[in-house]
Amino acid sequence: HLVASMEVEESYIMIKPDGVQRGLVGEIISRFEKKGFKLKGLKLFECPKELAEEHYKDLSSKPFFPKLISYITSGPVVCMAWEGVGVVASARKLIGATNPLQAEPGTIRGDLAIQTGRNVVHGSDSPENGKREIALWFKEGELTDWTPVQTPWLI
Ligand code: RTP
């Protein structure tokens, strides 16, 4: 179980192909934006098979791995880098349980999804993986470190 930290962290959040196909991009982005996290990178992207396999390499021995790779590469995804205090655990909370039927109402998966194999969004599971995944999915020039103007509630 992830405990919310007081550190400024980065999380890699990705809207999976079903989220894009179902027209949920704005809805999902708005949840992180309204919470108060800072968007540092955003792109619509067709994920090559090799990248999907690298991203999910820890799951490569699982029986569902081939299905997972074809799901993630089945259409464009929206890649995002979000920054903020405790963003990794907080984003996992906003996203909800892996199985959408177990995700609480009010969470993204709890409100918008039914199946584990079509659970609309990914969020990094540790600050280390947040950094690793952002480096994996974004090139250097694609990230912007900007300072919010007169919005002290954004960190
Ligand atoms: P994610 O990495 O996408 O945020 O998901 P997670 O941590 O909640 O779940 P994880 O166990 O890391 O699994 C990654 C993704 O693989 C798919 N999955 N399918 N039994 C199955 O068919 C199955 N189990 C997992 C899901 O898309 C899950 O989000």
Image: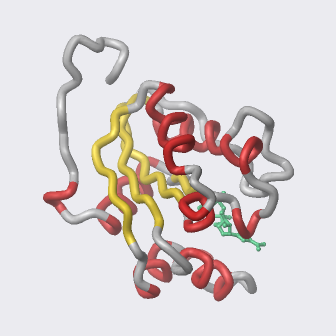
Q: Position of residue 82 (x, y in %)?
A: 38, 42
Left or right placement of residue 22 versus residue 134 in this view:
right
Q: Position of residue 141 (x, y in %)?
A: 14, 58
Residue visible at 55% across and 75% down? Answer: 72
Q: Residue furthest left?
A: 141
Question: Which one is nearer the viewer's eye here, 6 or 118?
Answer: 118
Residue 1 on image: x %, y %: 68, 43
The colour scheme of the drawn protein is: secondary structure
Residues 136 and 43: in front is 43
Assign ligand 1 to one image quadrant: bottom right
* Above/below status of 47 relative to 63: above
Q: Where is residue 145 in the image (x, y as percent from the top left)?
A: 18, 40
Q: Quadrant of the C terminus?
A: top left
Give me the residue at 56% from left, 80% from top: 74
Furthest-right residue in this view: 101
Residue at 62% of width from left, 37% of height from top? 94
Q: What is the total number of numbered labels drawn onto the structure image? A: 0
* Residue at 29% over, 14% down: 151
